[in-house]
Amino acid sequence: MIRDSELDAGTLRAIVEGTSAEVGEEFFDQLVKHLAQAMGTKAAWVTEWLPDVRRLRAFSFWVGDGYFGDYEYEVPGTPCEAVVDNLELIHVPARLLELYPGDPDLAPLGAVSYMGAPLLDLDGSLLGHVAVLHDQPLPESERARAIFRIFAGRAAAELRRLRRDRVLREREQELSTLIDSAMDAILVLDEKFRIAGMNRAAEETFGVSEEDVAETAFEPFVTSECHGRLIYLSKELARQPEGRQSVWLPDGLTGIGAGGAPFPAEATLSRFEVSGRPGFTLILRNVNDRIEAERRIRALIEETAYLREEIAALQGFDEIVGTSDALRSVLADIERVAATDTTVLITGETGTGKELIARALHERSLRAEKPLIKVNCAAIPQSLQESEFFGHVKGAFTGATQNRDGRFKLADGGTIFLDEVGELPLDLQVKLLRVLQEGEFEAVGGTKTERVDVRVIAATNRDLDRMVGEGKFRSDLLYRLNVFPIHSPPLRERGDDVVLLAESFARSLAARSGRTAPELTADCRARLLRYDWPGNVRELHNVIERAWITSPDGKRLDLERAIPDAPASTRPAPPARADDARIRTASEMQDFERENLVRALEAAGWKVSGAGGAAELLGLNPNTLSSRMKALGIERPR
């Protein structure tokens, strides 16, 4: 069993690094292995709960120095039964066989002690559990329990991600079933107007199978005149703003069916983008049925797209990397306010991760199963903002050929994130205030009052108090938004978090390319800490990616080229000696810093923290001093 004294920051960091690069089955394999090693136990395992049969099925089971095969067991008579029934951490420090004589698996393992914890969903329901077992006693230790809870939290987050992934697959199946069951022909075309997919009605209409015509040109299926018209319309749609990239062909088109027989059809053509690449949906349908079926399909597509974004980013606090006091304060605020419906205003410089904070708030709220709808207020043209927020009815303005739901309607029951809220014009601020106060609005051109239940999270890098004084932002709206403020600290105030983030970005780049992540050298760490990062985390990510691309051998990051020239850092510099006023090079300054730290350590008898320690002499945080010692290669003499 690991001793309390061994649970230092290095141990915690090793735990995070050992389990952060994988997902799914590989994640659980790494987790149980590192859990057993960190706890010093013989076995560790993670399971999922099968409530219908009251059994636990292991995702991964580590015993001794290897993985155990498929393992599933009933919980009655086992130490895991108390975990499942009580939904709390259970610790049996010794005499396990005496307490659970009916468990047939304990004796072969020589089991003496046990610790297990439930893995819960956001609504408190049981997903599974994580446990360790040892052939020696496991004495009580608060720090050991803390380590165990870290693993349990990470395992629960991954189980929740897998559950959301299943929901996504079900939603995609629902969408596929709806499209296939439609009586009208639906075709998906790529940017070159090749057939990317079609439903069963389209196969029957054109007398072909999707498999036979996949990736072939659509041109033979309509007359040459209609094909030219569709190409022209596709180019026109690309010039239209988002939300207006669809057109009804009132005069219809002439299709070419089986055997070359022409047939008249009414149709709609819509443009969409996936991963930056355009595509088109062509629907040949009865005009009376077109509007309702298209609305249902678009709603499902939009909801699936939002769910995809949530799945891609669903990692909770794992995405927010760092251990600084400034970041810990933010995480504590998130935990305090997440479970409420309180409106939150996130402030901070650009690139500090305000969207990550919003996502963390949503995922820890009671609305987590509903969508998180994100709106960049600065990216929507002013003429379209009201329609984007509240939707419009057919005929409300030129180009409004159908009813369209706005972002608040899509977020009903969930959360809406208003990024760059300081960019909203004053007239729209009035209507937003009404939604916050009354929970109701009217679509553009409509007369029906819509009611929604939406939690609002807003973010800005602007000084809203100053904007209120200048008459550019309503004071009553600011009061409504600023119920619970959270400030996202800039990277320059987060100390050694810059190194942890850089390592995380490097591992992510390496995983995507199938290569080994490079280690940060002492020089790399020093360069990262010297730079002020005016672009914050976003700039750091770009710099690491640039350093990865320009790396000469793929084994180290080329930070010398990647970090831009910038004004001198505002980080506190080591005290200068009065007898040395000449200008030093960067290498000389590093040598001087190392010499100064060694002097302080020697004066303190190599005591780093505490009263009379080197950190106190230097006026540094002990963690910062430890990091600088590691970066400069300073070790206590043997």
Image (spheres, rainbow, N blue to C red):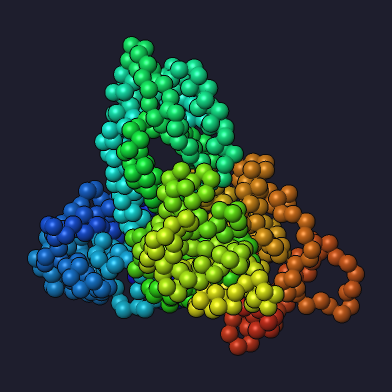
Quadrant where the image shows the N terminus: bottom left
Q: Residue at x 61, y 43 (%)?
A: 554
Number of marks in the image?
0
Q: Nearer the viewer, residue 80 or 278?
A: 278
Q: Position of residue 638 (x, y in %)?
A: 61, 70
Residue 52 in view of the camera: yes
Q: Residue at x 18, y 70 (%)?
A: 85
Q: Position of residue 563 (x, y in %)?
A: 71, 54
Q: Nearer the viewer, residue 415 or 123?
A: 415
Q: Residue at x 55, y 62 (%)?
A: 419
Image vertical order of residue 138 relative to residue 251, above or below = below
39 relative to 518 in the view: left or right: left
Image vertical order of residue 593 relative to residue 541, above or below = below
Q: Residue at x 38, y 50 (%)?
A: 303
Q: Residue furthest bottom?
A: 611
Q: Nearer the viewer, residue 484 or 127?
A: 484
Q: Residue furthest top?
A: 259
Image vertical order of residue 442 relative to residue 99, above or below = above
Q: Position of residue 457 (x, y in %)?
A: 48, 68
